[in-house]
Image: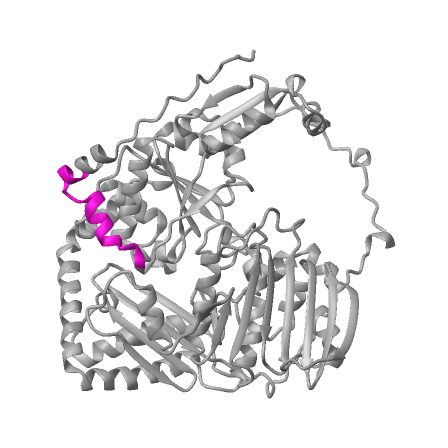
Amino acid sequence: MTDEKDTPIADDSQQPTVAYNDDNIRHLSDMEHVRTRPGMYIGRLGDGSMPEDGIYVLLKEVIDNSIDEFKMNAGKRIEIDIEDNLRVSVRDYGRGIPQGKLIEAVSVLNTGGKYDSKAFKKSVGLNGVGIKAVNALSAKFEVKSYRDGQVRSCVFARGVLQSDNTEPTDDENGTYIFFEPDNTLFKNYSFHDDYIETMLRNYTYLNTGLTIMYNGRRILSRNGLKDLLNDTMTTDGIYPIIHLKGEDIEIAFTHTNQYGEEYHSFVNGQHTTQGGTHQSAFKEHIARTIKEFFNKNFEYTDIRNGLVAAIAINVEEPMFESQTKIKLGSLTMSPDGVSVNKYVGDFIKTEVDNYLHKNPDVAEVMLQKIQASEKERKEMAGVTKLARERAKKANLHNRKLRDCRIHFSDAKNNRKEESSIFITEGDSASGSITKSRDVNTQAVFSLRGKPLNSFGLTKKVVYENEEFNLLQAALDIEDGLDSLRYNKVIVATDADVDGMHIRLLIITFFLQFFPDLIKKGHVYVLQTPLFRVRNRRSKIRGKKKLEEAKGKKGDFITRYCYSEEERLKAIEELGPEPEITRFKGLGEISPDEFANFIGPDIRLEQVTLHKTDQVQKLLAYYMGKNTPERQNFIIDNLVIEEDLPEADTDPID
């Protein structure tokens, strides 16, 4: 028993009381609220290096309004220009925003024309929020409405009106929007052309007849979702793409010889990257219809193995799970209409069944593919069962996986998109990351040595190889990406030859067996610094550097350098004779320092996969059994570089 006098009793009277009075009650204007809580409106800020970063949401919100005009048969052309990857202008030739309410339409939340279903029956933006967020989060925002020989132009700065003018014009009706994201919020931002072009192509696939001019380049689609699959598939289909359209629904699909399933889904032109009720309905009913057509007791997983598909539907007053509209939550096609599940199911049951009856040659190829998948699954049945048991016995949370508290698959958590897992090699590297990570959102999976080269092997190796089996279990992707536990899968290896080899082996594994993990943008490579350049504040020379040193703690100013160019620049800035450290491995970086590299300023390089990448050809060459050919290539292309200077030319105590 503990003596009372040994147990301190809290004295509440000694705790300072925080004042709480009328002055603490504030009212924020609409624009102030958006700027204070931007995450509520655009998800995240970012600098444009990731496709989900906020600047792309701003662009999408502007384009969505122009797309809605097209859907209402008002304007078939949209012109988009991005200057210096910083400033955006969008001009459509629709009806133009009603000029009497122009200011309210772009600056007052919950104000817009899309509450009236007669004007915008099947629109993406229904909440009257999107364009206002663009206005509030832009250093400069300008809107022009061209209607019936007049143009009204309003200019804002960070949501505050600066000017309002109306004058005659000869220009066509429509709307012009200019915005420059506020760089005090989107620090060091830059628009990336690849992300934008993908976004714009998706718009044209879903809106045949629409022409988008992007920085002078014409983008259009004549065959809708069929074009989407043709342009994005990295493996050839084993039969021609089946493309079917109905009222408010369009689907396209084929089978390939790749593992897994791949889906592209859209609602009212919005790319629902996380799927939703429409995608779930498609997956269920495509498998059921094919099963019933062949009248065989196939497993749904065998039917869908290798399936690449796209579905687009139009819904009245759609409900999404967030303002960024990446997952459909609607259960019905309209407030008083048929369910999404039944609508999609009835269409697939009728149209796909009819197609297969009319095209027996396609049906035969499909049947052979399904039977091959079934045969492979049954051959693996015993191995799979044992592998699952091993994964459970391995006690992932203690042996291989240092988990985080928030998971991508946790629909209840609004921070799930922040979740990530670092795949690293060795105890020292994983130890540094584990000690410096954010335990809420960052998990660590530790490999033991180099993983197996899986190129050319069947999926049986995923279960027979302990490392692959445990990695698959940690990610929870055995049955597809629906249960993926982490939004970002980050390969974190040393910046040397061995680290590069391990990186390639891991990426080869994903390309072979889980290509959709890469195609959906979940795989990244961690960039860690090659050098640390530092010098004592007392040795810094130059007025600018002295000013920079003011008010900072510690004796040193430090620069972390990710390239030789950055190293040379840092030496120039921090001279004379700074201390230079070359990091040879992740384990050499202390946990305190590592926190700088996996925190808010983390540098990630996304692993991408495009049709033009010739993935199978590249894998066959670099990961295949043609060792002599690769050796000759290395010998013919070997370049000997000068050794780097010694690390410590003037060591600092």
Q: Residue at x 29, y 86 (%)?
A: 350
Res. 81 visible in picture: yes
Q: Quadrant of residue 504?
A: top left
Q: Main secondary structure of the magenta part?
A: helix
Q: Is residue 625 magenta?
A: yes
**For the view shown, which residue lies furthest in the front direction?**
170
**60 sits left or right of 21 in the view:** left
Q: Position of residue 585 (x, y in %)?
A: 39, 27
Q: Magenta segment, which residues?
A: 612-630
Residue 175 image offset from top left, x and y in percent? 63, 76
Residue 255, percent across and down?
Answer: 23, 68
* Residue 293, image quadrant: bottom left
Q: Quadrant of the C terminus?
A: top right
* Residue sitting nearer the eye, 569 or 481: 569
Front-most of 220 and 428? 220
Residue occupying the point 49% across, 41% down: 603
> In screen coordinates, is 387 left or right of 378?
right
Count of labels in the image: 0
Seen in the picture, residue 616 relative to 433 is either above or below; the reply is: below
